[in-house]
Amino acid sequence: MKMLHEKTFIEIGFVRKAYGFEGAIKVVIQEPFIEGIVEGCFIFLDIDGCKIPFEVTSIQENKDTIAKFHFLNEREKILPFHQAPIYRLKEDLPADIEEHYRKNNTAMFVGLQVCRANGDPMGQIERIDEYPQQQMAVVLTETGEQKLIPLVDAFIIRVEPDRIIMDLPEGLV
């Protein structure tokens, strides 16, 4: 049996609330992932720190996205999951969707450790701020200072599951 490491999941949306009395759920799914949610696929919900799979038994898109998941077929079973994140396995996503997400959803960088090209840690990304020119990572250094680092392709060497390696110009941080 294959162990699923925490970093093999991508958050794709969240449960809004129960819909009706027969186990339907209003969900919000991020745009690049909505086409991948079909009957028979599996989503994961976090239950007490463990990602538990649920099979999608139906999904409808109108004004809202309404889904039903196997075993969550009663309103009372859904209530504990209001506002809970929805995850998919990275390996279940088409490569082009993951690449699109990586390039366009820098929110995934929040919580990553920022390291210099030589591997020295600089701090952790607290949030991403939008500026007219570019996106800036707000990094909390180990001394408690906040630093702004431009998120531009020229500075990013690679992104790993728990850190982002950057080659920053001298004096930037």
Image: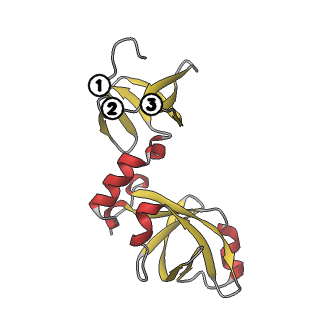
Image quadrant where residue 22 sits? bottom right
Task: Judge whether 91 appears above or below 39 on screen.
Answer: above
Label 3 vs 2, first from the N-terminus: 3
Q: CA distance from mark 3 to mark 1?
A: 24 Å
The residue labelled by disc 2 is 165
Is 27 drawn above or below residue 71 in the view shown?
above
Q: Is residue 8 above or below residue 25?
A: above
* Helix, strand or loop for disc 3: loop
Q: Amino acid at mark 3?
A: Gln
What amino acid is labelled 2 in the image?
Answer: Ile
Question: In which quadrant will I find the N terminus?
Answer: bottom left
Give whichever of discs 2 and 1 has the lower sequence position.
1
To which residue does mark 1 refer?
117
Instruction: Measuring from the top left, give residue 64's x and y in whole percent.
Output: 59, 73
Q: Amino acid at mark 1?
A: Ala
Within-10-Å neighbours for mark 1: few <14, some 14–19, many 20+: some
**Dot 2, how many residues are within 10 Å of its Cα: few (below 14), some (14-19), or many (20+)?**
many
Report the mark closest to the observer, 3 or 2.
Answer: 3
> Measured from the top left, where is residue 17 in percent x and y?
67, 71
